Amino acid sequence: MTERKPGFSTLAVHAGSVPDAATGARATPIYQTTSFVFEDVDQAAALFGLQAFGNIYTRITNPTTAVLEGRIASLEGGTAALAVASGHAAQLGVFHTIMQPGDEFIASTKLYGGSINQFNQSFKSFGWNVKWADPDDIASFEKALSPKTKAIFVESIANPGGIITDMEPLAEIAKKAGIPLIVDNTLATPYLCRPFEHGADIVVHSLTKFMGGHGNSMGGAIVDGGTFDWSASDKFPLVSQPRPEYQGIIIHETFGNFGFAIACRVLGLRDLGAALSPFNAFQILTGIETLPLRMEKHCANALEVASFLDNHPAVEWVCYAGLKSDPGYKLHQKYAPKGAGAVFTFGVKGGYDAGVELVGRAELLSHVANIGDTRSLIIHPASTTHRQLSDEQRVSAGAGPEVVRLSIGIEDAEDIIGDLEQGLAAS
Amino acid sequence: MNHDSYEDAYIRGILMASRTVAIVGASANKVRPSYFVTTYLDSKGFDVIPVNPGKAGQQIAELDTVGSLAEIDRPVDLVDIFRKSDVAVGVVQEALKMDPLPKVIWMQLSVKNYEAARLAEDAGLKVVMNRCPKIEYARLCGEIGWSGVSSGVITSRKPKLLKGIQRFSIVK
């Protein structure tokens, strides 16, 4: 069994988890504890000095969270993962490890509005400067490069429009520049798309979405692809240079192809503190066990709903890469052939007001800011998730005034369609 | 044999069958990976012999240290090479003069030398290249998972606890 390469669904249930060493408990126990006793000062010193494997304090490692980390790393095909309190915390952790004040990174304009805010506002105050590039114009990424550029950041399937990013040419650009390609794989999940197979070096997740899948727990993850050579230049001193607080250990040399994940943990998480609760880790872990089943249903429902909207007279346009007529269909076939995801947008005739009204009439669909829930969700981004952006930023992010975003759940497709039908009929 | 990837059973078999380990290039510097490997294998019950000419007759990690493989007074199962790849042939030649012969030549993570591997295999020894015995042991016993590292091992068997706290042992 161990020499056979297990399939995705087997990994979704088993990877990272074994029966509990002390009790034989088969489900992963919730280790709801802040700290772990030491045998003696020597063992404590070995753990603090990163010389032995083991848990010290739940801010840095926790056995329940570790099962989640091992599972995500395995599903993505990476070497290691670090689970944190939210998707935003994952992004903070990655950039803290990569960036020094005054450095730059290039990000796609087609991102979750919250990420656009994080990069434009808080990151700027750390001296981490974002340069925006348009994923429809690959050359714009190359043009944005400078000697200070430390990374390229994109979403595999972009929120809110469900637009699939052409990652391979971007990976080439990053490789030539000696910088990592970071891919937010939240909307795709590794079931639909595995960015490491397309040249990504780091994957980040909001586990709050499809990974956990039930809309009950916040969480985020950083996954190390294990392929990037952090020591090839002096661009990434946290990973490639001796660390004074660990008596001069060089993290990349010591931990090899999972060194980046370790650096994010023992430098970033240690100091930034956005640890995941073990209880949330357990909830998300339980969610991941059914990820393949849920994603099949999410995607099948999304395609049915998108087709319905595409033929509806009150609908101006539908942006869903799963539709054969969609400009993104080819990229969907290349990067995520099992499904184009379950988050997409459409334009209602009548602009901003019509969008707001449709959301207000929903009876089954919930008006919430989240996505990737078992329940179908509806929102008008221009008045909510993307409200804090400028008009121009909203349009380039795919969140113009007439845009309505759906996150299709796993209910019966005809019930979801029925609710949209009554909402649109009234307009 | 193919040295680009190893089956878990091959690595597990080597680690379970080995008791005495000579670490050629063990450093007394507590932040060097060779020091971590020395202390970790010692903590797992291996009889570890650091080999370092600059520290002959002294101790590294409280273990009696010798200047060369020839100075070791007991049979060695596994010789772990913590030296640059280009000197691996010389280390294997020294290992092949030992009596009895060691059973395994293990080259550390980033150490690769196909000529050294061939020499050892021609003499009937098993070879592992470009791997760390600490990482492999921790991967196969399950400890490495505590650091969020994917072990690649799928099993419904419970890990084996050693005496103490947070200490696992590899099992078949």
Image (cartoon, coloured by chain):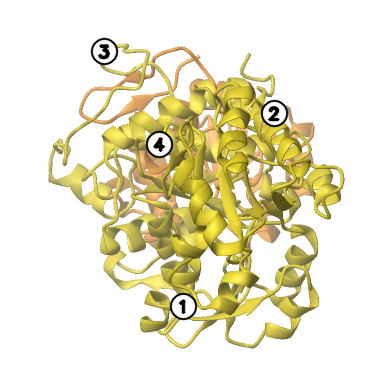
Chain colours: A yellow, B orange
**Residue B169 image offset from top left, x and y in percent:** 38, 24
Q: Which of label 1 and label 2 is nearer to you?
A: 2
Q: Chain of mark 2?
A: A
The residue pinned by badge 4 equals A215
Q: Which of label 4 and label 3 is nearer to you?
A: 4
Amino acid at dot 3:
Thr
Horizontal relation, residue B79 to residue A100: left or right: right
Whether residue B103 is visible: no
Q: Nearer the viewer, residue A121 or A145?
A: A121
Q: Earlier in the sequence, mark 2 or mark 3?
A: 3
Q: Nearer the viewer, residue A267 or B134?
A: A267
Q: Nearer the viewer, residue A46 or B69?
A: A46
Element type where label 3 sits in the image: loop
Q: Nearer the viewer, residue B151 or A165?
A: A165
Both marks 1 and 2 on one chain:
yes
Horizontal relation, residue A69 to residue A308: left or right: left
Mark number, residue A120: 1
Residue at x 50%, y 23% (from the top left corner): A289
The residue pinned by badge 2 equals A300
Whole-angstrom CA distance, mark 4 to mark 2, is 20 Å
Q: Quadrant of the N terminus of chain A?
A: top right
Element type where label 2 sits in the image: helix
Q: Chain of mark 4?
A: A
